[in-house]
Amino acid sequence: MSELVSLRRDGNVGVVTVDNPPVNAISNAVRIGIIARLAEAKADSGIAAVVLACAGRTFMAGADITEFGKFKSPGTSDVIAAVETLGKPTVAALHGTPLGGGLEIALGCHFRVAAPGTRAGQPEIKLGTIPGAGGTQRLPRLVGLEKALAMILTGEPISAQDALATGLVDEIAEGDVTAAAIAFARKVVAEQRPLVLARDRDEKLANVDRAKFDELAAGYVKRGKGLLAPMAAVEMLRNALDLPIEDALRREWDVFLELTASEQAKSQRHIFFAEREAAKIAGLPADTKPREIRRAAIIGAGTMGGGIAMCFANVGIPVTVVETSPDALARGLDTIAKNYKSTAARGGLKPEEAERRTGLIKGATDMAAVADADIVIEAVFEKMDVKQQVFAALDKHAKPDAVLASNTSYLDVNEIARATARPKSVVGMHFFSPANLMRALEVVRGDATDPGVLATAVAIGRKIGKAPAVVGVCHGFVGNRIQRLRTVEAERVLIEGALPHEVDAAMTEFGFPMGPLAAGDLAGLDISWSMRKAQGLRAEIADALCERGRYGQKTGKGFYRYEKGSRAPIPDPEVEQLIVATSARLGVTRRPIDRKEIVERLLFPVINEGARVLEEGIAARPGDIDVIWVFGYAFPPWRGGIMHWADTLGLAYVRDRLVEFAARTGDERHKPAPLLAKLAAEGKGFAT
Ligand code: NAD
């Protein structure tokens, strides 16, 4: 077995190498190993300088988060102390993704050399906490307070070029980064360069524009919606200005421990793990391998087809989109090109990269163009006969081993598969709108879907940056099926006494970025209206709005009214009158409904339906439902997902409230699902 941390000599330079695949997570054994090897290097009089490097695909990419909450000594700060007190020049050789504790250790070295593709950052905020080993103190001393604020508050990594420009790294390596770091160390020794640790550098903190910092910080805190971690991170950065570093470091550690143990952080860790767990498909033969995807084809260049095509182009996979007419095709390709251009104009992409990606997407109006695609994703109208025609044509033109996927939102994937002579190759891939941005992806397993096809759909989903979860066939799969209960309940609370802005305020206060009614206005109320009509269903308020031509933002009126050119929802007395009149017509005496009740009325039935989805095996794990709802329906990640949230409330409480809701509404679906009732009776949660 290879050593986790080794020390070798390269002339007068000692090279400490961490080798803990896959990402060199800083486990306790790694920390012990680095400290031991540094001690050897310190004692070795033949070693004049030390390079800290990592084997494999990346420099230490962060803490071993399975150890979160059960810290063992020595900690990462002890590793940094060993680096800082070595008494010899130290150079970190960065490649891959030096993140979190990995970057903090590098910040303890005198110098940093990075490979060209390196992406370095402090992503702790994404797990509901802050850097805990000096990141909030050493980073601003190297890159300046504003840059550190941006890095720590967004959690987004920066490129090697950016790191060089801001002073985070001293050199970008040409060729092997360890060799470059060794050469750098040798130069430092030969030139007897002054050695100044990040902790002792304060030139970048000397002339900080405090007013500007406060303004920027307030913006981040506001976007963080009162979450604990962003507020704490700002406080720590202020400490960098106001406190001696030792005091600031102690405070950082205390706050880190407190935040890491908080419910918000636990929920964010839950969703982090749930996303990875969801990519593991239950019940596949051990030898199942995903197929390689070199080229893709998308059928339909509408809203979804265009977005899905961009997902492939974004990771360098060439795509062909197939449309029915040259006009429709030109419109679709034009929208894609405009999307890329506007991203470039906003600075999100380099113009040449936007052009390269646009160039990877080709168009065709003949189905024969799918012939060389390894995966074909259908995104045509949501009509069974249209989908079946497309799949029958794919049967003729697609390669024998191509994966044939449908982006249907509701339709029966098995029925679609029967239109081909190869139902084994057919799978659902339900993307969310806008498909180039939303990370949710329901991979729908049909009765005949081949394990390799399923594994391919999940693997390519991950490759294009999605958070795939495998689901079974049913109307609306997991996400839309459980969401429907929220929509129905939103109508009911309107009729019982709430107004649209009260419903939306309750839900945004809960943590959704937008209320469900404003979201309906954005998506267009006519879409669900026509679906309801097709199913013989009625929604008193929403239907009445549509009957008056109020389709939402596109007509300037929906649940709200909109000023010309504005997307800001304004409560509309006409809608309030309509709602009050509807209550009266239905014989309902309106009553005040508080925010807590609105949230529970809208979301507990969703949890209940989630329990049914689990009972029926439509979802394999409660965490899969959480992943779908966080990444597809903007459920607040710091609440961990809808099923996790239910666990934190206690299922007995959820059950009791559902019993009350069932009695109030007479809706049978609100009666607690057997699984929920059973777990509640046993005092358990979905996850335990
Ligand atoms: P859309 O109307 O914007 O686009 C559909 C496109 O398919 C049109 O451009 C049309 O010309 C093209 N088309 C129709 N028949 C075709 C054929 N035989 N060959 C090639 N192209 C054909 O619709 P959309 O919103 O992109 O939805 C597409 C699919 O995605 C539907 O199944 C829908 O349920 C699903 N979906 C939509 C959303 C959403 O929010 N819009 C979200 C998830 C899934």
Image: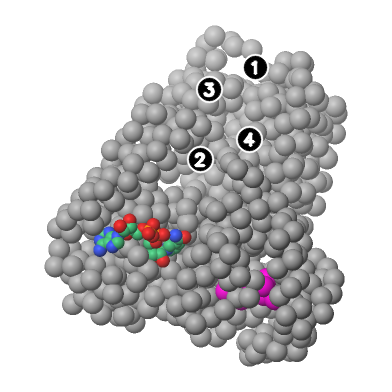
- Disc with the residue nearer the chain's start (2 vs 4): 2
The percent position of residue 662, horizontal first and vertical second, equals 72, 87
- In the figure, 606 relative to 332: above or below? below
Q: Is residue 531 left or right of residue 85?
A: left
**Neighbour class for label 1 at 10 Å: few (<14), some, many (≥20)?**
some
Q: Nearer the viewer, mark 3 or mark 4?
A: 4
- Disc with the residue nearer the chain's start (1 vs 3): 3
User: Closer to the camera, 636 or 386?
Assistant: 386
Q: Which residue is mark 1?
A: 195
Q: Quadrant of the C terminus?
A: bottom right
- Residue at 71% x, 39% y is 220
**Neighbour class for label 3 at 10 Å: few (<14), some, many (≥20)?**
some
Q: Are marks 2 and 4 in contact (CB under 8 Å)?
A: no
Q: Secondary structure at mark 3?
A: helix
Classify mark 4 as within 8 Å of ligand 1 or not, answering yes or no.
no
Q: Which residue is mark 3?
A: 164
Q: CA distance from mark 1 to mark 3?
A: 18 Å
What label does residue 97 carry, if any? 2
Q: Is residue 11 visible?
A: no
Q: Which residue is mark 4?
A: 151
- Residue at 33% x, 33% y is 355
Residue type at mark 4 is Met
Q: Are marks 3 and 2 in contact (CB under 8 Å)?
A: no
**Neighbour class for label 4 at 10 Å: few (<14), some, many (≥20)?**
many
* Picture quadrant where residue 71 is located: bottom right
- Disc with the residue nearer the chain's start (3 vs 4): 4
Answer whether residue 111 is magenta in the image.
Answer: no
> Which segment is the magenta one?
483-492
User: Closer to the camera, 534 or 550?
Assistant: 550
- In the figure, 431 relative to 486: above or below? above
- In the figure, 659 relative to 34: above or below? below
